[in-house]
Amino acid sequence: MGLAGGVRLKWNQALNRVGRGVRRRRYSEGLKRHGLEEPPEWLKKRAAVTQREVSNRSVWIIRPRRNPSGRAILYLPGCPLAGPDKRHTRFALRLAVKTGAEVWLTCSPADSGADYAQALHFAEQVYNELRHVYAKDVVSVCGDSWGACLALGLCQRVSRQPSHLILLSPVAGQEAGLSADLQRKTGRGDPLLTRDTVEAVNEKWMGGTPADSPLYNPSFADCAGLPPVLLIHGKQEIFYPHVEILRHRLMEAGIPLRTLRRNLYHTWMLDRLPEAYAALREIRFTINA
């Protein structure tokens, strides 16, 4: 490698380190902030947005203005301590526009103090409400990060399954409590999550839910009877080894499974990347199959 090539490589590596720090800082700060309490104006300009009250909590219903598919997606965002932020709201909009589906975005208030068990109960209430509006074969459930744990836990609780389950970078391996393999990977490969962030969220959100509960921890999920699953995650994620355990459990249970893996960080599919738009196309193909 020549001098110019070596300088360019070091410069790219430096930019990558800076990018990792910025993404981590934004993610950590996002966990401390309140989420969006009302649908923002930019969202209303790009889609038809209404609000629905379920158990005194708000659900945003985002409808594409063009080419509606007649399908619906319950989207459980992975922001347990703050409610949906701009990043998750933008993804919900892209989800509606690219798939043509009506997206129900759960918006639990940040100061509600809800733990995982309460959030799971609320998700089930919203799902049942959605099922009253739509037929079974057109409703899918999607969640990212800790929201993917909710989505998987929801499908283990309900008797009437959705048509598809979409898991985006699910958090797994909580039983490790930061076991040796999680500690080794945390902070080294994933540019978004740190060990401290994972500890903070688990401590505040688990409540009385055991770390090895099948409803909370995908590594112990009861996969029998689940609907077809689309699993999208990244190889740089600190949860990658545990998500692979989930993938093998789904295969052993005979669940129809599609997997999309990229050498990227936690919840990369929510950002504006070429790979993220490919993930949206995969979601559109899956729910319309």
Image: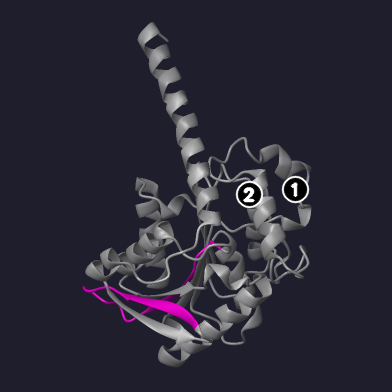
Is 72 contained in the magenta span?
yes
Q: Secondary structure at mark 2?
A: helix
* Residue 178 badge: 1
Amino acid residing under circle 2: Thr
- Quadrant location of the C terminus in the rendered image: bottom left
Determine whether, in the image, residue 209 is placed left or right of residue 280.
right
Residue in the picture at 27% in, 64% down: 42
Residue 242, horizontal then vertical, whole percent: 68, 53
Q: How many marks?
A: 2
Task: Count residues near mark 1 (Cα–Cα under 10 Å), then give few for <14, some for 14-19, many for 20+.
Answer: some
Residue 118, horizontal then vertical, whole percent: 64, 77
Residue in the picture at 65% in, 81% down: 157
The part of the image, by quadrant, that contains residue 217 is bottom right
Residue 61, horizontal then vertical, whole percent: 37, 78
Does 221 appear above or below 196?
below
Q: Nearer the viewer, residue 137 or 272?
A: 272
The part of the image, by quadrant, that contains residue 229 is bottom right
Does 5 appear above or below 98?
above
Amino acid residing under circle 1: Leu
Q: Nearer the viewer, residue 126 or 155?
A: 126
Q: Nearer the viewer, residue 278 or 113?
A: 113
Does 110 appear above or below 57?
above
- Quadrant location of the N terminus in the rendered image: top left
The residue stretch that appears in magenta: 57-79
Q: Which residue is mark 2?
A: 197
Determine whether, in the image, residue 32 is placed left or right of residue 59.
right
Residue 71, horizontal then vertical, whole percent: 36, 79
